[in-house]
Each structure stands twice: as structure tokens, then as C-alpha cells.
Amino acid sequence: MQITRLRLSGFKSFVDPADLAIEPGLTGIVGPNGCGKSNLLEAMRWAMGENSPKSMRGAGMEDVIFAGTGTRPQRDFAEVSLHAEQVAGPDAEVEVVRRIERGAGSAYRINGADVRAKDVALLFADAATGAHSPALVSQGRIGAVIAAKPGERRQMLEEAAGIAGLHVRRKDAEQRLRATETNLARLDEIIADQD
Ligand code: ATP
């Protein structure tokens, strides 16, 4: 999967709509301290489903919404859209949008259709990337990789191999299996009652 475009509006310091084309090859973002370089990487991770406000450097998820300045009022929503090209899959081009409104939480869309956070996480996990991908190297991340425990390293390798989504699907399948077993047991009881 190649991420080709990042659009954001009302996200942290990016109050006005901003549109960044991500060309093939190495992309560097340069600028003075506090100009919003880290906010761009965070916007990418947020659109991929990041659900820890702490890792977005906030106390709550609504802290990603533009908080206002002396001259501009705060915004009521933030929206980030990621365009990507997939190597395989039914749609070669995919657009993932995450939007958060004050008091209403987050909503996700894939190619215009409303989806669950889990669908977005699976889309990126299958493409060997995602909000926690080691490919997104934020400040302090290198130290964290070096200090990671064996279980955490295994998780990174599984994400890199694109198999992390299988664990989620397995858990889902096990839950459905348990629910079906409960239904079958209940059915047996009903049949036995009727005999
Ligand atoms: P450095 O080079 O120091 O790491 P940076 O270019 O990575 O800086 P960021 O950390 O991305 O900069 O941006 C910090 C700026 O974003 C600060 O000015 C902060 O006030 C602003 N900011 C963060 N959250 C919000 C918000 N919710 N509303 C408005 N501005 C915000």
C-alpha cells in the first residue's frame, strides 16, 4: 500500500484545510519548532485508527480538534483523509476518512461508506501498516523499539508481515463459535422439553 495524499481540516494546528501530496520516494518535512511537523504524522496515525489520546499528546481524543487561538475561535470538528493505492484488493485506490465532532466521538468512512474503526484497522493491518506500524517513526520511537520486550517485538514483526489482522479475525470467529455453541445448547434444551 502506498499512501499518496493526506488531507486535514481542523486537526490540531491545521485549522484551515491542508492537502499534501506524498510522492514516491523519501518525503521529508522541515520547518521551525512547533510549526506542526509531528502533527502531520499524528494525523496519519489518527486516520488509521489510533485510539490512545496519550499517543496523540492529548488528555482526551477531542484534543485533536483545533482549540482556537487569540485570533481564531476553536473548531467543532476535525477531519483527516488518507488516500492510498493498494497493490492488491478489490479497489486499487482507497480513501479513508476519520472525523471527530465535539461531544459526538469519531466516525470513519472507507471510499464514502460508513465503517467501523475495526474495519479501518483491518484494512491497514492487511496492508502491513497501521497506526502502530514501526514504519511511522515518531520522536522516542527508536528508543522504544530497542527497549521492547520479546512479545512486543513479535507484534512488530507480525504487523510488518501483514498478519496482525488475522488475530482480530480469529478472536471474532471464536466469539461467533461460542455464541453458536450457546444457541445449540439452548436448542437442545428446548427440544428435550418438547419430548
Ligand atoms: P518540534 O520541531 O518542536 O518537534 P513540530 O514542528 O513537530 O515541533 P508539532 O509538535 O507538530 O510541531 O506542533 C505543535 C503545535 O501544534 C503547537 O504550536 C501547539 O500549540 C499546536 N497544537 C497542538 N494541538 C493543537 C490544537 N488542538 N489546537 C491548536 N493548536 C494545537
Image (tube, helix red, strand yellow):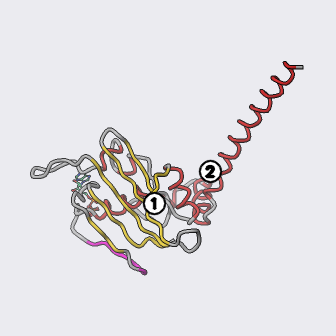
Q: Which mark is residue 176?
A: none
**Horizontal and vertical percent for residue 114?**
46, 52
Q: Main SS type for the magenta part?
A: loop
For image coordinates 33% across by 42% down, the residue present is 59
Residue pointed to by mark 1 = 143
For image coordinates 42% across by 80% down, the residue present is 24
Q: Residue furthest bottom?
A: 25
Q: Residues within 10 Å of mark 1 (few under 14, many from 20)?
A: few
Q: Residue furthest front?
A: 194
Q: Residues within 10 Å of mark 2 (few under 14, many from 20)?
A: some
Q: State the residue in front, 130 or 34.
A: 130
Relative to residue 128, is residue 178 depicted above or below? above
Is 69 left or right of 96, judged from the image as shown?
left
**Horizontal and vertical percent for residue 84?**
45, 69
Secondary structure beneath dot 2 equals helix
Relative to residue 119, is residue 3 depicted above or below? below
- Mark 2: C-beta under 8 Å from nearest atom of ligand 1: no
Which mark is nearer the camera, 1 or 2? 2
**Horizontal and vertical percent for residue 40?**
33, 63
Q: Quadrant of residue 34?
A: bottom left
Say what amino acid the circle numbered 2 marks: Val
Say what amino acid the circle numbered 1 marks: Gly
Q: Residue furthest right?
A: 195
Secondary structure beneath dot 1 equals helix
Residue pointed to by mark 2 = 168
Q: Which stretch is magenta?
A: 24-30
Q: Say whether residue 18 is magenta.
A: no
* Mark 1 vs 2, N-terminal side: 1
Q: Quadrant of residue 102?
A: top left
For image coordinates 33% across by 55% down, the residue present is 79
